[in-house]
Structures are given as structure tokens and as C-alpha cells.
Image: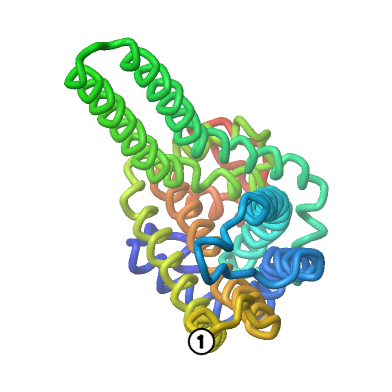
Amino acid sequence: MDLALRPMSTSQVLDRTFHLYRNNFVLFAGIAVITPALKLITLLIQLKIFGPLSIPQTPEAMTPQFMQALIVRGLITTLVGSVVYLVGTALASSATAYAVSMVHLGKQTTIADSYRKVKPIFGRILGLLLAISVFTFGPLLLSYALFLVLAFSMAFLARGSASQGAALAVVAIAGIVGLLLFMGAIVWIFIALCRYALSVPACTLENLPAMQSIKRSKFLTLGAKGGIFGIIFLTGLMTVVLTYVLQMPALMASSAFIVSSKTHFSILATIWIYIADFLGGAIAGPIATIALALVYYDQRVRKEAFDLQLMMQAVGQAPPAPPAAAASSIS
């Protein structure tokens, strides 16, 4: 409770994150397991339908039929995986934010209670994540589409030019424009991830509509995006490293299949990779969500004197309204 009543540095947020996670491992891991579990089930179903990945040994094996099947499999995997990720994340991130709010403020909760509290707002959280995905990755997709249109248009115009130098200049301009658009979209992704990082805690804990939660996150993250980026980067790196370490034996076995005369990954190696991904997501997945929920409280303390609001509530006085409009918190 003491850390909840004063501002925290980035290192203190991370220290508090690991403290809460270590002392409530079953709670947070139990909540977070739903996303990697849904992903694992989906991958196993796809493995049953499509079989293990085939690896052509010669260029002649790269037939149009093989490439078509590979593209279809990739599209199905991406589409189904995106839907599963959004549904699982909507449930787990909201329930984790609620659980953090309870244990961080010295209260008790359970996995079932956390999911029960966020069940009524599941649709809202799902819509919120969809909106954030569009705002974050939409410019990248748009820049890619514009680049393709520009490239084809310039290539068509260059065909009518008698000068080879002019055609090369047109291609060079298209390449530069495409590169600038791509780089700008990548930079925006990092900015947007930090800008909207507190939307789910705001929606969950203040019962706000989706768009109001995004506006709330933009307000709370002002001046704190550097620390939020560091938290997202470090916790994401931990997840990747842990998952890779767990997958390493299966990856080594798969590499042996690649350099051998066999053309398919081992089913056991593939399942091992899937299970390692599940374990990595279940164990390391909650860390980022816990940390961002703590950043949410930290920013409210800094910008809205949330510590004074809690003290006034404890003595039975009505706290003043915060600067940004917010509905009453879930309790």
C-alpha cells in the first residue's frame, strides 16, 4: 500500500511488478494462461488439419501448388491467430488489471473473481483492442498499400518513357517514398503502443467507454512514454528470451531435419515448440500487464493526487473529481 501512495520511478515500477508477481504467481499466471492456451489449442488443431511444415529440398519442389498451399496456410494461421489473440488478450489483460488493482492496494481477489468482475465489459475491452490495433498498425498497412499503388503507377509511366535514365529515376523515387512511409509507420507503431498502453486499465478500473479510455490513456501517458517504452521493451524481451530457451531443444531438432534428407518437421518437435510457446506466454505474459497497471496508478498519483483521493475515501469524505472525466472505479 505504501508504494501505491507515492510516485514510482521506472525501476521501482519493475521492482513492484516482480514483487506482486512473485507473491501472487498462481493468481496472475492463472489469469494470463487463457491467451497462450487458446493459441496452443488453435495451433494443435491446425497441425492436425495441415500436418507438420514441409520443407522443399530443391527449387523444383517449389511448385505453384506448393506455394499456393503455403500462402493459404499462412493466411489462415494469421487470421485465426489474430482473432484468438484479441479474444484471449481482452479477457486476460482486463482481468489482470483488476487483480493488480486489488493486490496493489492491499486487497484480496481470486482468478474467478477477477474474470467475474470483467465479464460484463468484455465486449467493450474487445472493441477497445480492435480500435487500438487499427490506430497502431493501420498506418503501416496504409503506407504499404500506397507504396504499391505508387510503385505500379510509376512503373506504368516509366514504360512509356524512351529514356532508361528516367525510368530508373522513377523507380528510385518510388523506393525512397516507400522507405520513408515504412519508416514513419514503424516509428508511429512504437509511439502508439506507448500512447495507448493505459487504455485497458482505464477501461477496466474506471468503467469507461472504449474511445474515452483511449483519450484517458493519452492524457495519463503524457510525459511518461519513455518509461512506458522501456517497460514494454524489457518485459517483451523477457518473454522472447524465455520462450526461445524453452523452444531451443525442439529448434535444434528441427534444424537437424532441415539439413537432413527429410522434408518435414518432426511432429513431436513441432508440438514441443508449441508447448514451449505456451509456457513462455503463460509465465512471462503477465509481467507487462502488471507493470502497465502499476504505471496507470503511478500516473494517477502524479497527475490527479490519487493518493489523497484514497485517503479521503478511507476517512469517509468525498474525493474531488479528477482533472480528466472518469466514471466510478470497479470495486
For residue 113, above or below residue 137: below
**Residue toward you, 187 or 81:** 81
Residue 284, given in percent of the width and then of the height, sits at 54, 73
Horizontally, residue 236 falls left or right of residue 157, namely right
Q: Is residue 330 visible?
A: no
Residue 73, given in percent of the width and then of the height, sits at 69, 55
Residue sitting at 22 percent across and 25 percent down?
168
**Residue toward you, 169 or 209:** 169
Q: Residues within 10 Å of mark 1 (few under 14, many from 20)?
A: few
Q: Is residue 231 visible?
A: yes
Residue sitting at 69 percent across and 63 percent down?
35
| Amino acid of disc 1 | Ala
Outermost residue to the left: 165
Disc 1 secondary structure class = helix
Q: Which residue in the structure is indicated by mark 1?
A: 256
Residue sitting at 33 percent across and 10 percent down?
160
**Splitting the image into 4 quarters, where does residue 157 fall?**
top left
For residue 260, above or below residue 294: below
